[in-house]
Amino acid sequence: MAKKKQIVECVPNFSEGRDMNVIKQITSEIEKTSGVKLLDVDPGEATNRTVVTFVGEPEAVVDAAFRAVAKAGELIDMRKHHGAHPRIGATDVLPIVPVSGITLEECAELAQKLAERIASELQIPTYCYEAAARTPKRRNLAVVRRGEYEGIAERIMDENEKPDFGARPYDEKVARTGCTVVGARDFLIAVNFNLNSTSTRRANAIAFDVREKGRPVREGNPITGKKKLDENGKVVMQPGTLKGTKAIGWFIDEYGIAQVSMNITNINETPLHKAFDEVCRCAQNRGLRVTGTEIVGLIPECALLDAGKYFLAKQQRSAGIPKEDILKIAIKSMGLEDLRPFNPEEKVIEYLLAAGEKGGNKLVDLTVKGFAEETSRESPAPGGGSVSAYMGALGASLATMVANLSSHKPGWDERWSEFAQWAERGMELQEELLHLVDEDTEAFNRIMAAFGMPKNTDEEKQLRTDAIQAATLFATEVPLETMKTSYKVFEVCRQMVTTGNPNSVSDAGVGALAARAAVIGAGMNVKINAASLKDREKAEALIADADALVEKANAEEKEITQTVEEMIRK
């Protein structure tokens, strides 16, 4: 199965917001790090602080963050720093945020390793906070930053207050750089819900209805009454309905409307679509309507896909459709184009990152005609392995089509969920096989690159031989993965032949034929590449796996096509 690409976001805050030359030198360290993309640089003069946002794969992001911290420590002298915002060091806080393919716990591990590296290699004392905190009380940034920069000298060697990494007597270097606080937190979605009203008071009422903090409990009149206090003299609060959210109401002159402005700090607890529906419910209870949604900044793909799937399920429609179609449902359902056009390519983090990557010429991005023509050219790649993977993807697509037709068939409404699940399974297989289309060509390119290595000395010859063998093994394993994934397509095809829309039984049968061709074709690639492996025990094991899959695929296809023929003749 193709492993989902891991993407993380990093949002360091640097204690310099006025000298653009210094800021540029710091952000240049990020920009020249391969594998990351700088998304935003937001300097503030009053706060004397710059918030930077960049994304990429975990290792690249951690490396870029380290280099930026090093440069900030070199250029920013905290002894001269003054600003309105709380701060503890040249690089004040540095959170790592999961975007896709990675958990918050994994980001916490990355943050702790980065904190340790900053302390050991840069001699900057470092604390860990939020999900990366090493003690419960340090999850709270305010606790970690207590006393700010001016309090470091007193805290740095205190047993209860010292940094997690790099504690040492206060010296000139610490005085210059201060400390850094590294952590991990969930992705924060900033969103505004548009109202058909100009009333800030009404917008605030809705915000208090939903935000986790809620509103004060009052004695007598719920608006003007005296706030109720508990036995400790603290205001008693009536919690709102949405966990992990902060919200307020305001009026926007630019649009001439009131909005409920919300930060969703825990998108697992409160996904975007849940917040949208709840704000709509509370607005309706107060005689208002939500006319649309405004995403502030960027959003991870999963938030929109989850929303699209949620609204499709409410319509009793299958989500086993292309991502682009799911995104359209999300955009329309939440009114993301109410105030201005919403372009996922400009608002979704993963798409922005992909747009900046080099080597983006993928076979799967070609037209059908373009793929056929590229295959026909005299270059050996793409070859049989890529075509086999594509045939498998077409088999999965046909089975998925039948599942979607069955899910939406008049009179079969009570079975929509059953077929929707099969359609989603088919789409998963299609995506994996499309990934293998390019993976197979990449495998061939690795072999060519290995053969191109120098061979002037014995050491170079050995390195070249080892590289050729490693590339050949990879080129054998990729088509074997294509075989395994294509074989899984039979399960969906069989189900659609036996229980799906009978008018489309032939389509599911063709899907099975395509899956069989994919298994057999990829098997040929396994065998021809395994022939070049020096490790014969490994080679024979791979060939045995391929032979077993071919035998099983032949049996599956024969049984499925026989069933198709019988049903057609009825």
Image: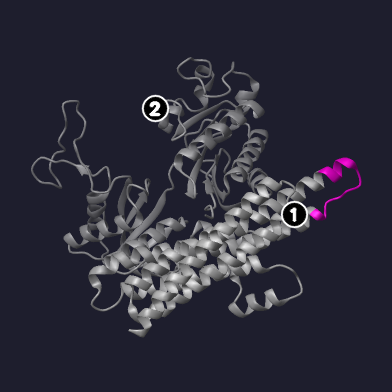
Residue 145, relative to residue 207: is it above or below? above
Q: Amino acid at mark 2?
A: Pro
Q: Quadrant of residue 60?
A: top right
Rendering coords of residue 129 (x, y %) = 46, 32
106 left or right of 450 in image = left
456 within the magenta span? yes
Which mark sits nearer the N-terminus, 2 or 1?
A: 2
Rendering coords of residue 559 (x, y %) = 43, 70
362 left or right of 184 in image = right
Q: How many marks?
A: 2
Residue 123 appears in the rendering: no
Residue named by callout 2 = 136
The front one of 391 and 277 is 391
Q: Could you tell me which quadrant the C terminus lies in?
A: bottom left
Q: Give the Cα separation between the discs numbered 2 and 1.
A: 56 Å
Rendering coords of residue 37 (x, y %) = 60, 53
Residue shown at 29% from the left, 45% from the top: 243
Q: Secondary structure at mark 2?
A: helix
Q: Amino acid at mark 1?
A: Ser
Residue named by callout 1 = 532
Residue 506 appears in the rendering: yes
Residue 33, relative to residue 523: is it above or below? above
Residue shown at 41% from the left, 74% from the top: 401
Q: Quadrant of residue 78?
A: top right
350 left or right of 522 in image = left
**Residue farthest along the left direction in this orientation:** 220
The segment highlighted magenta reads 451-462
Residue shown at 68% from the left, 34% from the top: 74
Tell me the tag on residue 548. Answer: none
Residue 7, relative to residue 122: is it above or below? below
Q: Quadrant of residue 225?
A: top left
